[in-house]
Image: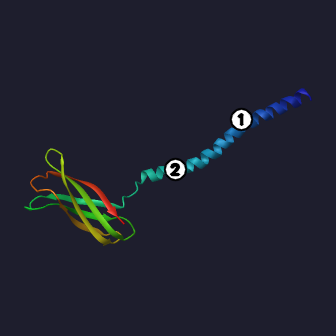
Amino acid sequence: MSKKSMLARLALAAVLVIATPVALVGCGGGSSAGGDDATAEQAAEPEQEPYTVSEEQLDTSNQFAVYVTGTLTNNTEDEVGYIQVEYNLYDADGAQVGTALANTNNLKAGGSWKFEAIGTASPDEVASYELVDVTSF
């Protein structure tokens, strides 16, 4: 084998050794860049929660019961057969003193429900509340 032929083979081998990983990374990068763009778009558009709760208010004006009122909106494209909101009730020191629950049936897709969750604590004990869960099926 001549020196020129040997150098040509070494040069070809060097090109293949360098070009193959670069080509693979380039192919993978193009594919993954498309995936990254899709991921970036998804991150830019936060997924909407299936339900939103708004206009919450604590009502301790009743002598025998405490209420948390508000509006729940079904942000899905499906009717919900059953849905429930659950709140924890706290005293002025932050200790839990009870819970409040409300539920309804057949909430239409995109529908709103004005709820009144009734609490198990004495109204004079309750200083604050916290939404714990929205359950549906």
Answer with left or right where residue 42 lies relative to residue 13: left
Answer with left or right where residue 19 lies relative to residue 5: left
Answer with left or right where residue 45 lies relative to residue 106: right
How crowded pointer 1 is (Cα within 10 Å; few <14, some 14-19, many 20+) is rated as few
Count of marks, rendered view? 2
The C terminus appears in which quarter of the rendering? bottom left
Q: Position of residue 56 (x, y in %)?
A: 21, 58
How crowded pointer 2 is (Cα within 10 Å; few <14, some 14-19, many 20+) is rated as few
Q: Are marks 1 and 2 in contact (CB under 8 Å)?
A: no
Q: For marks 1 and 2, give the CA distance.
A: 28 Å
Q: Position of residue 59 (x, y in %)?
A: 13, 59
Secondary structure, mark 1, is helix
Above or below for 18 versus 102: above
Which residue appears farthest toward the right when viewing the image? 1
Specify the amino acid type for callout 1.
Answer: Ile
Secondary structure, mark 2, is helix
Q: Position of residue 110 (x, y in %)?
A: 34, 68
Q: Nearer the viewer, residue 132 or 8?
A: 132
**Residue designated by label 1:** 18
Q: Which mark is residue 37?
A: 2
Name the residue at 74% across, 35% down: 17
Q: Nearer the viewer, residue 51 or 48?
A: 51
- Colour convention of the picture: rainbow
Name the residue at 49% across, 50% down: 39
Q: Nearer the viewer, residue 110 or 8?
A: 110
Q: Position of residue 31 (x, y in %)?
A: 60, 49
Specify the amino acid type for callout 2.
Answer: Asp
Above or below for 74 versus 18: below
